[in-house]
Amino acid sequence: MPERIETDVLIVGAGPGGSAAAYHLARHGIDVLAVDKATFPREKVCGDGLTPRSVGAIERMGVDTSDPGFERVVGLRVHSKDVTIDLPWPELETWPNYGLVMPRLGFDHLLLERAKKAGARVLEGTDARLPLMHDGWVVGAETVPAADPETEPTEIHARFTIAADGAASRFAAPAGVRRDDSRPLGIAARRYYRAPNLGGPWFESWLDLWEGDMLLPGYGWLFPMADGRVNLGAGLLSTFRNFKDISATRLFAAFATMLPEDRGISEDSADGRMLSGPLPMSLNRAPQAVPGMLVVGDAAGAVNPMNGEGIAYAIETAEMAAELLHEALVKDHLGLAMVYPQALRERYGRYFRLGRGFAKLVGKPEIMGPATKYLLPNPRVMGFAMRMMANLTDGRHGDRQDKLFYLLERLARAS
Ligand SMILES: Cc1cc2nc3c(=O)[nH]c(=O)nc-3n(C[C@H](O)[C@H](O)[C@H](O)COP(=O)(O)OP(=O)(O)OC[C@H]3O[C@@H](n4cnc5c(N)ncnc54)[C@H](O)[C@@H]3O)c2cc1C
């Protein structure tokens, strides 16, 4: 007989999505067990950037954002070939007015510790190989030690399961979750550098990436870190022309080469390897609920198509799943949690639809060229664009920019 463990809620994956789900369920007193095939602290390829939206999400998990491991950023500095513009974060009631940077190595560990402190059980080094199925319901997972996959599997039986297993999401697939190729996907690469010139307390972003005389589709970023290193990265979207011909690795190499010498980006200042990974966007995985299981974060394809931000959305979707499951368990009516996809559509449907339109537009050089030339120097227009791309608003009752944002969202039919 395989070893058997029982829990009310099993969470597969303990990145930001899994830890947030575990934290919010444990906070409600629910018996919750999170498993991750990695042992923490573990590296995750990422830009390590937290916008004010992400800061809001981790504040709700009780994270102390004055921790010296965080670097604070005051806004976004955007560079094109001819113009550089500074866009401070907006002053809003709903969101903090600062962003943060922390390498995922420490950040994900910190979130997992919050979940443990709230009372969640955690099994690290544990690979959830397959969902356990009974009468069409997911009722847990078959797990093996990640370091010794030939061992006799353990069965974890749960009343409900949350798949938070990231962009590859091999666990959720056998339960019927599929990728929707009509929705955008990003790919990006990043590397750390010990850089003498951090560039200031800004997220820096480059809109034109040049390989010699050739303009490549894509964007670059440089995020400062508290330990004096920078996270340098480049990425592109599946909506961009030549997406299939240009790898994130090539784009990254072109970006790292084109930066001014005084930034100190070179092979000598590099710290570790360049790593790349996918960004599944705009809820490009469906269904987000199958009987007995909800899907959150990258496993649900929840990255924002306007700015490639996924941490805030992993935490928010996990929080929504946790709240619904809490209610379903308290009322002993598990079917109640199945409204989760509808709740996702209500919260993100219109915004992500707007984002898909935006992703198509920025993929067209004939539109992006003039837009960069004429709109980038205008702080008002760019301030609004930045608010919209980072999804930072006080909603319909906010200021004039919020009202315009709200109107644009209403015009985008939810789907
Ligand atoms: C190059 C790059 C740059 C990015 N930059 C940013 C950025 O600056 N800011 C931002 O907000 N977002 C960024 N993102 C997106 C962000 O990294 C993701 O959206 C975020 O990590 C999603 O969190 P998650 O918890 O859903 O998944 P993950 O963080 O991927 O966590 C999934 C966890 O599940 C575990 N797991 C997987 N399968 C199993 C299994 N079968 N059994 C047990 N455990 C399993 C994994 O070990 C992992 O720990 C970037 C992504 C990339 C690729």
Image: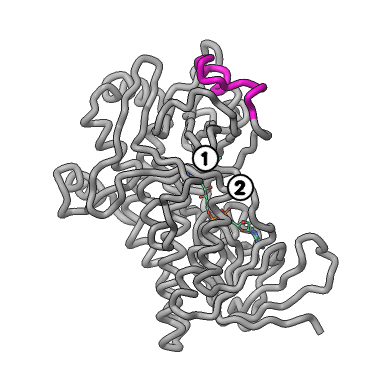
Left or right: 8 as drawn, with respect to 200: right
Read off the residue under disc 1: 47
Q: Residue at x 54, y 31 (%)?
A: 232
Q: Residue 374 carries which label?
A: none
Q: Which residue is the extreme one toward the top? A: 213
Whole-percent x and y of residue 34?
A: 60, 69
Q: Which residue is drawn at 54% across and 57% down?
A: 110
Tell me the kind of residue under disc 1: Gly
Magenta stretch bounds: 254-270
Query: Disc 2 on helix, strand or loop?
Result: loop
Whole-percent x and y of residue 192?
A: 59, 33
Please state which of residues 145 and 340 is positioned toward the viewer in this rendering.
145
Q: Is mark 1 within 8 Å of ligand 1?
A: yes
Q: Is disc 1 surrounded by few (<14), some (14 to 19) or many (20+) residues within 10 Å?
A: many
Left or right: 396 as drawn, with respect to 240: left
The answer to if 262 sits in the magenta stretch is: yes
Q: Is residue 212 visible?
A: yes
Q: Does the residue labelled 2 lie within 8 Å of ligand 1?
A: yes
Tell me the kind of residue under disc 2: Lys
Residue 224, above or below 287 = above
Q: Give the image quarter of residue 359.
A: top left
Residue 237, above or below 60 = above
Please state which of residues 389 and 97 is positioned toward the viewer in this rendering.
97
Q: Is residue 185 visible?
A: no
Read off the residue under disc 2: 44
Q: Distance between the residues labelled 2 and 1?
A: 9 Å
Q: Residue at x 72, y 70 (%)?
A: 143
Query: Disc 1 on helix, strand or loop?
Result: loop
Judging from the image, the colouring scheme is one colour
Left or right: 275 as drawn, with respect to 2: left
